[in-house]
Amino acid sequence: MSWFILLPIIALVCGSAPVFADDDERYLNCMNSFDCGNITGAGYPFSGSDRPGYCGYPGLISYLATCNNSVIVPARQSALVSILENPNAT
């Protein structure tokens, strides 16, 4: 088969392929981020607020977070994570 025929066919098939995540409700729900005090746009690996549990890290329910005085607090204290306003701080 000639490349002049094959290339347009490949371009047509690849160009019209649907993006399956565009209408997946789980994907759309996980696009939401949440704010905690001065921290805006918190997301993965945390679930919580209006983010369903499946948006967090798989198998780690400890990342189900609540906001407490500008600190994102996981459900289990052993996994305590505080997000600092200065991202370069350790």
Image (cartoon, helix red, strand yellow):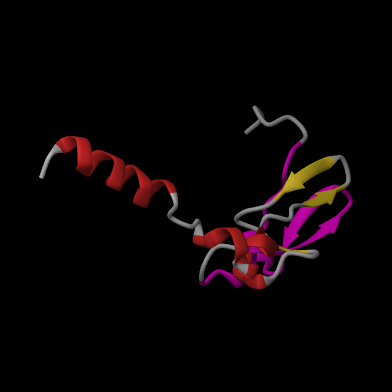
Q: Magenta stretch: residue 77 in it? A: yes
Q: Magenta stretch: residue 9 in it? A: no
Give residue 20's position: percent from left, percent from top. 51, 62
In the picture, measured across the screen, residue 36 lies left or right of residue 90, that is right
Q: Which of the 4 image quadrants contains residue 23?
A: bottom right
Quarter of the rendering occupied by the C terminus: top right
Residue at 29% in and 46% down: 10
Give residue 32's position: percent from left, percent from top. 73, 55
Looking at the image, residue 66 lies above or below residue 15? below
Quarter of the rendering occupied by the N terminus: top left
Residue at 83% in and 57% down: 67
Looking at the image, residue 70 lies above or below residue 4? below
Looking at the image, residue 56 lies above or below residue 9? below
Q: How many marks?
A: 0
Nearer-the-camera pick, 33 or 8: 8
In the picture, measured across the screen, residue 70 lies left or right of residue 23, that is right
Q: Which of the 4 image quadrants contains residue 87?
A: top right
Q: Which of the 4 image quadrants contains residue 66?
A: bottom right
Give residue 68's position: percent from left, percent from top. 86, 56
Residue at 88% in and 46% down: 37
Residue at 54% in and 60% down: 21
In the rendered image, the residue lying farthest to the left is 1
Which residue range is magenta in the image? 59-84
In the picture, measured across the screen, residue 21 lies left or right of residue 6, that is right
Nearer-the-camera pick, 23 or 90: 23
Nearer-the-camera pick, 55 or 82: 55
